[in-house]
Image: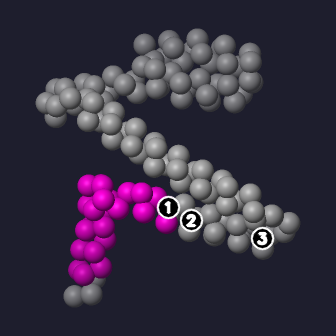
Amino acid sequence: MSAFVNIILSIWFAKIMGLGGIFLATIVARAISSGWTDPYIVYKYVFKSSVMDYVVRCVKMILRLSVCFVISYFISRYIIVSNLLTFILKAIVLLIISFSSYIVLSFKTKEFIGIKNAIVFLINKRRK
């Protein structure tokens, strides 16, 4: 199913956008077919729970990432790149802002707490 959708969309998008359309068609085909069936099957038959848990987590993650993107975008507009040094400065500033904003938006999630605990464990293990 996914391959069929991918071929049809690739032909259609390639006529409109060229090579970039083929890449976009692959992403769209994956989202249309396997992007929702895989989680549905895994959550229903493996986890024995509702796929809505997965959907809600994905929507929250997309919203957090969108907020990080918007913050980074507006701050990046004020750093003008005129040479390699300002490019490197802009990259470092945006990296710090992206990580910081994502941490602030995610620090109470189970995933973040799990990663934090794993890092603390590794640091403590290395000290011994």
Q: Which mark is residue 97?
A: 2
Q: Which residue lies furthest to the left in this view?
A: 48
Residues at circles 3 and 2 in contact by the CB criterion of under 8 Å: no
**What distance separates the C-alpha of mark 3 from that of mark 1?**
22 Å
Q: Residue furthest right?
A: 82
- Amino acid type at mark 2: Ile
**Mark 3 / mark 1, whichever is N-terminal:** 3
Q: Which mark is residue 101?
A: 1
Is any part of residue 42 visible from this angle?
no
Q: Mark 3 points at which residue?
A: 86
Front residue (pair 4, 100): 100
Mark 3 or 2, which is nearer the eye? 2
Q: Is mark 2 on a helix, strand or loop?
A: helix
Magenta residues span 100-125
Task: Determine the image quadrant of residue 108.
Answer: bottom left
Task: Determine the image quadrant of residue 23.
Answer: top right
Residue at 41% across, 45% down: 61
Q: Specify whether 42 is left or right of 67.
A: left
Rendering coords of residue 63 (x, y %): 46, 44
- Which colouring convention does the figure follow? one colour
- Amino acid type at mark 3: Thr
Q: Residue 39 carries which label?
A: none
Rendering coords of residue 40 (x, y %): 28, 25
